[in-house]
Amino acid sequence: MAAPAHRRPPPLFQSIVLDPIRSFTRLEAAGSIVLFGAALVAFVLANSPWHAAFEQLWTTPVQLTFGDLGFHASLRQVIDDGLMTIFFFVVGMEIKRELVEGELRTGRQAMLPAIAATGGVLLPALIFLVLNRGTAGEKGWAIPLATDIAFSIGCVVLLGKRVPRALLVFLTALAIFDDIAGILVIALFYGGGLNLAGLVWVAVLALVVYAAARLGVESALFYTAGGVALWIGFHHAGVHGTLAGVLLGLLVPARTRRPVREVLGELGKHSGLTVEVSEALDTSDLLSIGDEVREAVPPLQRFEHALHPWVAFGVMPLFGLANSGVSVAGMSVADLTAPVLLGVALGLFLGKQLGIFGFTWAAVKTGLAEVPGGASWRSVHGVAMVAGIGFTVALFIANLAFGAEPELLNQARLGVLVGSLASGVSGMLVLRALP
């Protein structure tokens, strides 16, 4: 038998650059670290001598014309209204996965995070409204509602075994319910006035996509075309177009056409027969194996797996860069205590933790649910604090609420940054101090 060929060591570039990058991207908290870095860079540049050029970058016009048809928007609008649709598509698929096979598939499993999320939605909105009732900033009441799933879970993951796995699952399910609440709020309160014809168009398109999914259509091209059509339909219906991503994610098939065990059994037989043949192996066999494996993986799982790196390391950091550039130059004490800024910051920091912890405590004490994994109340409080990180969706809603009012938008953005940072740091300190 010939000795196995000696594998040459990887090139210097691969060992110094590529391998560390691959190792980093495999970290569960990698996406939140990159997003935090993007937000920090945006904040620094917005308060640097290059602030004008940095802001001008995001207002750069983007045009696409085809005959008499045309698309005109700024670079920031392309990110917020276009690329963020992909983010919401992934959110929609995550929600469906949890409903079909995850922590939300039964009523009992979903009850406690649903109750906790209710508290985490009501109290922040109440705090904001108390501070802004009857003012121009009142319409921003929904900004402190949402938990940023990437940041909050990333913070908990960084703490390792200090946080029980059951609490991480609880936080994930809670953030999913928060996303659902945020999506409903955007649809109901931040549209441009409903148009019945547009809604009918959306309903027809959704039925077409649903029927195709039921018939076993798995083509990524088909769902891409369906998503674009739904986006246009939502836009004309007076509902924010990014919600097309959520609806499409919920429509993508989550079941396989063939049982996994059956496919694996056939692959085992096929591989055994192929290897036993003395002739040279044909690489086309690998293509047939790939097709077999593809049939065993549902489209939802394939699409989510393919898009997650692009969203985590592309879409979300770009959104952070475009929307976290808050200038504090020239701000006075009065500006730092503006009702919108305080309402958002206190809503995220106080409203989230008190609402989530209070509703969780009440649910457990009344016998409706049990503490996840028998965790201590101190650890539950720490997780509730971390859930006050409301970065991505909070900034998104701030843009919808105050897009035409730069001063209020700046206050809201700064409130999101302050409230999210305070929630994340204090929550991690509490969790890190656990025995």
Image (tube, rainbow, N blue to C red):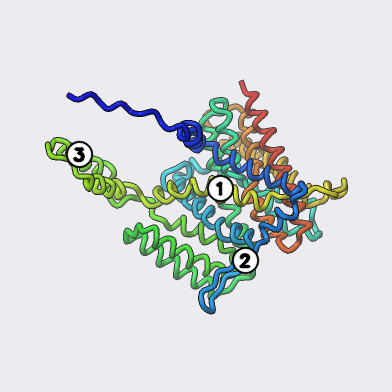
Q: Earlier in the sequence, mark 2 or mark 3?
A: 2
In this rendering, position of residue 224 left or right of residue 369: left
State the residue lying farthest toward the top: 435
Q: Alpha carbon of mark 2 to alpha carbon of mark 3: how far?
A: 53 Å
Element on which disc 3 rests: helix
Q: Which residue is mark 3?
A: 271
Q: Amino acid at mark 3?
A: Ser
**Residue corresponding to mark 1:** 177
Q: Secondary structure at mark 1?
A: helix
Which quadrant is the C terminus positioned in?
top right
Relative image position of residue 409 (x, y in whole percent): 74, 56
Please name which of the two marks, 1 or 2, marks the residue nearer to the observer.
2
Above/below status of 69 relative to 360: below
* Mark pair 3, 1: CA separation: 44 Å
Please name the amino acid that badge 1 sits on. Phe
Residue 426, image x, y percentages: 69, 33
Which of the two discs, 3 and 1, sits closer to the camera? 3
Closer to viewer: mark 2 or mark 3: 2
- Give the residue number, with chain letter if any, for mark 2: 73
341 above or below 171?
below
